[in-house]
Image: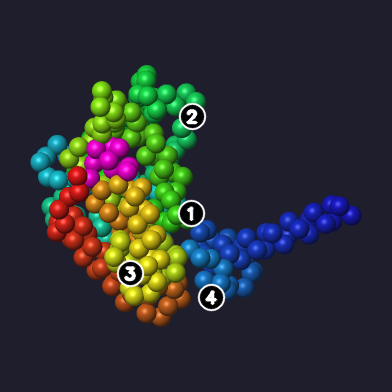
Amino acid sequence: MKKIIVAALCSVFSLHCYAADSVSHASAPKGSSVKEITNIDAVTSASIVPKQLRKPIVQTGFTDGSAKKVLFVVGDPRLDSSLEGFLVATAAEFFKKKGYEVEVRDLYKIGFNPVLTAENFYHAKDGFGKTPDDIKPEQALVSKADYIIFCYPNWHDSPNAITKGYMERVFSKQFAYRDTPKGLEGMLKGKGVYTIMNAGWLGGGQGDVGDGIGKLDKVWDKYLGAYKVVDDDTAGFWGTANLGRFVNDQSPSNTDPQYAQKLKALGELLDQHLQRDFFQRPEKK
């Protein structure tokens, strides 16, 4: 009897997983007879950009030339199909048009290990010992970059694990900051940091503090104000300037018949915010 019950439960769980999977297109099961659900949002809250509207993320890579350099640190397991991926592709294109060099570190694709182990804890915390081999190339890119843009979807109101692990392991002591007689000193002066985050809260705004759309503006500013406190502190810790955030909380529904128009408007809005945040505002020191 127990075996029958277990088999029945496994069958139910398998059915539910395939139903969600066949709709989200995270992977396409072959030979599944499960009827496709037409209302994607009823199954997944994840944003899915239709295939015909997806933009490739094109990077130039860094050279030893004098052009300004932008490093994108991206933590999204669905980068090719997600709205976050569209935002990254749009931002990369924006900076390339400005003549900037663009390097994109897709943390999932390169298999970055975000775990701070006991073996490398004291390197990250105190700068003791040798820099781990997998961290050396990342620190070299950060050193070359004029701007570092962290890109990740909002899941629990903070950088997701792989992005946070990059911050902890790469921005280590004696590389990003050090002790001085006057206290901690940031070592990455002259650089700027920024965040691009796709969210799914209450549809309150697009951008940063003050960029609400007239719907729950006080709540929007409270949320983004809290992020600003953390971003300012982190940037100050590293000696960098916090250039703010672009948070998108106006994602079109996956089944919206006007998806293409809304996606185009979103890309244009991101361009406007990048122009404002990087080129029209005085850098915060």
Residue in the image at 47% along x and 23% along y:
119
Sequence-wise, which precedes: disc 1 or disc 3? Answer: 1
- Residue where numbered disc 2 is placed: 117
In the rendered image, the quadrant that contains the C terminus is top left
Q: Amino acid at mark 2?
A: Thr
Mark 3 closeness class: few <14, some 14–19, many ≥20 residues within 10 Å: many
Instruction: Indicate whether 79 appears above or below 190.
Output: below
**Nearest the eye: 208 or 17:** 208
Instruction: Give the spatial CA distance, label 1 vs label 3.
Output: 21 Å
- Which of the 4 image quadrants contains residue 64? top left
Q: Position of residue 278 (x, y in %)?
A: 18, 55
Q: Position of residue 209 (x, y in %)?
A: 30, 61
Q: Which mark is residue 212?
A: 3
Asked whether residue 103 is in view, the answer is no
Q: Amino acid at mark 3?
A: Gly
Sequence-wise, which precedes: disc 1 or disc 4? Answer: 4
Residue in the image at 34% along x and 75% along y:
214
User: Circle 4 sits in a helix, a strand or a loop, which is it?
Assistant: loop
